[in-house]
Amino acid sequence: MRLFATCAKGLEPLLFDELQQLGATNVRQTAGGCWFEGDLACAYRVCLWTRLANRVLLMLGESFVKTAQDIPVAVAETPWETVFQSPQQTFLIDFSGRNHEIRHTQFGAQLIKDGIVDRFRAQGLERPNVSKEEPDLRINAHIQKEKLTWYLDLAGDSLHKRGYRQQQGAAPLRETLAAAVVIRSGMTSEQGVMFDPFCGSGTLLLEAAMIRFERAPGLARTDWGFQRWSGHDQSIWATELEQAQQRFATAKAERQAQFIGFDHDPKVLAIAEQNAIRLGLNEFCTWQVANAEQVSAPAVSISQEQTPLLVCNPPYGERLGEEIQTLLLYRRFGAQLREHFNGWQVAVLAGDDTLLKRMKLRSQRKYKLFNGALETTLALYDLTQEQPEFTQSQSNDLANRLNKNYQKFEKWAAKEGVNAWRLYDADLPEYNAAIDIYDDCVVIQEYAAPKDIPEAVAKDRLWFLIDTVAQALPYSAENITLKVRQRQSGKQQYQKQEPRGLVRVVHEYDAQFEVNLSDYLDTGLFLDHRWARRELGKLSEGKSVLNLFAYTCTASVHAALGGASDITSVDLSKTYLAWGQRNFTLNKLYGRQYQFVQADCVQWLREQRPQQRYDVIFLDPPTFSNSKKMDDVLDIQRDHVQLLKLAARLLKDGGVILFSNNKRRFKLDEEGLAEAFLVAQDLTQRSISPDFARHKGIHHLFKVRQSD
C-alpha cells in the first residue's frame, strides 16, 4: 500500500526517522509529511505508534484533471463499493489545495463527493450520505496544479488526540509537538529522569514518559477510521494492539523513572495527575506547586542511566501587558539554571529568540518548530559543561542614560510638586521609546520602528530596553508596563488593551488624577500639558470656563481648583467623561456648576447660539480624527482657524482661548486668524517643562484673544 503521513511544519525529518523505525519502506520526506509504503500491519503500526504524525492516509487514486468537470469522473473510477463496508455508512471529505479551476475547498469537496456518489449509482447501489458529525469514513483529497490525489484517512480523527487529555491548561501544546520537543531534547527509552518546572497539564512529561515506557500513543484510543473500512483485518489489528500492550507492560515492570512536574497553578496540576492516571503512568510522576523563578534541581531518588533532563515551555508573553513579566521570568529562570542545574541537559521551547537571550546561557543547538501558526524556537543547553558568562552585545549607554536622567528628573519632580513625569524619550535613537514615571510605576511606550529596521532587530532592542529598565530603575516588575505607540486611526488609541487594572492616583501640583497604566493605550493624563493645565487654573478664578476635547477632564480639575465659577467639559467619549467625573470626585469637587457634555465638539460648537458665554476656553483637539461618531474628519493643521472662530463666538469680552495641539510641525495660520479678528500669543517654549525639553515640537500652546 502507498501511504502518506501528515505532520506539522518542521517535524518532517523526525517523522522520516520514526517511519523507518516502524518498518515502513521507501520513505520519502516532503513538505508537510512523508510518503511511505507498507503492508496492512505496517499501516496499523504507524497509526498506533506514531508520536509525530497527525494523519495516516491510504492512497486510493490519483489523476491529472484539466477542468473541474474532470474531477468527479476521475474519482468515480475508484471502486468505492470496496472501500465502504455498506452504502449506509456516512462519510466526510477533507479537501486541500487550489488551482485555476478550484478556488474554494468547499467546491473541491463537493466535486469529490459527486464522484463517490456517481460510482455507487453506476453500480446500481444506494448512495452513502455525507455527515459532518462523526462520519464513518473520512476521505482526504488534495490538488496541486492539475494533479489530484485522494485518500482514505485510516485513523479517522487527528492522531494528536491520544485519549488521555480530557482537560487541559490555558495554553496547551499539541501532543505531537510535545513529542517532537522531547525527542529533539534527547529523550529516549533509556532516559530515567525528566523535570518540567512549567508543566501545566503535564503534556511534555507524559509524552516523554510514554517514550520511556514504550507506551504506544494510540493505545488509549478506542475509535479508528479503519475499523469501518472494508479492507480492515481485525486479526492483524488485534495482533498489533496485543504486542503494543505487552511492550508497555514489560517496560513498566522492568524500568524505573522519575517524571517531575512543577507549576504555580494547583488546578492544572490536578489535571496533569488525572492525565497521568489515564495513561497508567502516575506512579512514576510527581506533581508539585512551585514557582519556576525560584526553582532548584529536584531530588532524584533513582539511579540515573543518563544525564537528567529538564524540558519546558515557559510563557510566551504574547498578550499586551505580559511582556515585562515574561522577560524577567526568563532572566530569573536563566539565573536559576546556571546556579542550581549543573550536570543537567536543558531544553527550552520559547516563542521568541530574544526571550532566550534574556536567560544569558549559550545554547548548543536550536530548532525551529511551529506551535500552531506560531513559530517557536527550541534551544538545547548542555549544563554538564561550564557555561561562560553571557555578555550582551549592547553597550552600557542606555543604563547610563537612564540613571543620569533619573537622578536629575526625580529631584526636579519632587521640587516641582508632581509625581508623574517623563524619564526618557528616545534619547538614544536605537532605543525608540518613551519612558514615563507614574508614582511607583513605569510605563514604557514603544514607538513604531523605522521601516528600514528589521522587525527582529527592533524587537531585540525593545527587549534589551525593558531588561535595562528593570535592572537600572528602582521599580518592581509588576509595576512596569509596555504600550505600543504608533500612528493611530479612528478610535484605536481609545481601545482597551488586555485588562490588568494597574490604576494609580498621581498628584500634579494641588490636583490629583486617576491614571490607568495598563488597560488603554493612553493613561488618562497627557504629561506634557501640565504647564498649560496649571496656567488654565491661574486664569480661572471667578471665571466661566469651557473645556473642549476634555478627555479625562484634568484641565477642568485645575480650573475648578483655581476657583472657576462654572465649568463645562465637552468630549465625544462617554468613558472618558465618566473618568473625568471620578477625577472631580478625587479632588472633592462637587456641584451643578460642573457640567459634563458628551458630544462631537465641532458639531456642539456649531449648534451653540452666538452669544458670549465663557471667560476662558481650553481647546486641546487631536491632531487628526476620523472617529465614526464625528460628522467630519478633523485635521488640526487644516481646520484650526475654523475651530478657533467657532470657539471665539462663545467668548465674553476680554475672554481668552488656550489653544494647544501635539502636531510636531504645526504652523499657526496668523493671516487666517487676523481675518477672523483673532490674535495669538505663542506660549509654546515656556509651556515645555524640563522633562520634555529634549524634543522640540512635542506640543504647541497659544493664548488667543479677539483683536481690538
Image (spheres, rainbow, N blue to C red):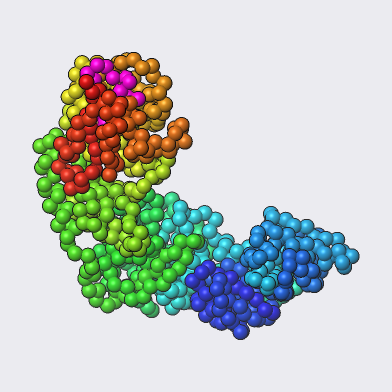
Q: Please state if 227 lies on the left or on the right of 301 as rendered.
A: right
Which quarter of the picture shows residue 692? top left
Q: Is residue 559 visible?
A: no
The residue depicted at 60 percent of the width and 64 percent of the height is: 158
What's the magenta region?
A: 646-660
**Residue 351 colored in magenta in the image:** no
Which residue is more in the foreground, 634 or 185?
634
User: What kind of secondary structure does the magenta stretch mostly adopt?
Assistant: strand
The correct choice, above or below, for 35 with respect to 409 in the image is below
The residue depicted at 40 percent of the width and 69 percent of the height is: 378
The correct choice, above or below, for 574 with respect to 257 in the image is above
| Residue 359 image position (x, y, % from top left) | 28, 64
Which residue is more in the foreground, 469 or 508?
508
| Residue 236 image position (x, y, % from top left) | 70, 76
The correct choice, above or below, for 37 with respect to 220 in the image is below
The residue depicted at 23 percent of the width and 34 percent of the height is: 701
**Residue 649 colored in magenta in the image:** yes
Q: Is residue 108 visible?
A: yes
Which residue is more in the foreground, 625 or 677?
677
